Amino acid sequence: MERPLRNDTGRAFVRVRVSGPSCRRGDHGEPEAVFLPDKVIGLSPRPSRVARIFEIALPRLREFSVCYTKEFGEYCGAIRAEIKR
């Protein structure tokens, strides 16, 4: 998905999340995986099993500025490290 469309989609998911219902979404990029949910579930290679669950403790309603924080980078790094295992 092109970056502008991906950003618009991300903002729409944030609005849905704030209004009450929860949503599930599959993703392969660490930044999107950290920005949108409160929880990221990492799966192992086939057969897929839950390898690790990351609780994302960043404030809600998330603005894009959170992407430039130390905590955001640490979450992305931890997820990236888990993928490379």
Image: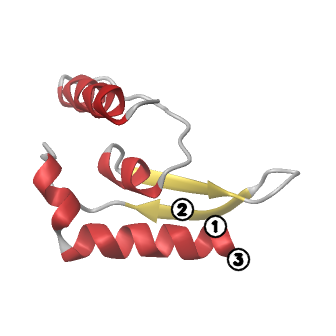
Kindly identify the residue that appears in the image at 38 percent across and 55 percent down.
31
Q: Position of residue 10 (x, y in %)?
A: 30, 33
Left or right: residue 33 compared with residue 15? right
The residue that appears at 38% across and 69% down in the rendered structure is: 75
Q: Residues within 10 Å of mark 1 (few under 14, many from 20)?
A: some
Q: Nearer the viewer, mark 1 or mark 2?
A: 1
Q: Estimate the x, y position of residue 60 in percent, counting from the top left.
A: 15, 47
Proximity of marks 1 and 2: CB atoms separated by less than 8 Å:
no
Disc 1 marks a residue whose amino acid type is Ile
Q: Which mark is residue 83?
A: 1
Q: Which mark is residue 53?
A: 2
Question: In which quadrant of the rendered view does residue 56 lie?
Answer: bottom left
Residue that carries the numbered disc 3 in the rendered image: 85
The disc, 1 or 2, on the residue closer to the chain's N-terminal end is: 2
What colour scheme was applied to this rendering of the protein? secondary structure
Q: Is residue 65 left or right of residue 79?
A: left
- Inter-mark Cα distance, 1 to 2: 12 Å
Q: Quadrant of residue 9?
A: top left
Q: Which mark is residue 65?
A: none
Q: Disc 3 vs disc 1: Cβ atoms closer than 8 Å?
A: yes
Q: Residue furthest right?
A: 47
Q: What x and y, as percent, mark residue 17?
A: 26, 30
- On screen, residue 9 above or below 42: above
The Cα atoms of the two marked residues, 2 and 3, are separated by 15 Å
Identity of the residue drawn at 34% across and 50% down: 38
The amino acid type of the residue labelled 3 equals Arg
Asked whether the beta carbons under mark 2 and mark 3 sit within 8 Å of each other, the answer is no
Would you call the spot at circle 3 few (<14 residues within 10 Å), some (14-19), or many (20 or more)? few
**Mark 2 packing: few (<14 Cα in 10 Å), some, or many (20+)?**
few
- Helix, strand or loop at label 1? It is helix
| Rendering coords of residue 21 (x, y %) | 31, 23
**Amino acid type at image mark 2:** Ile
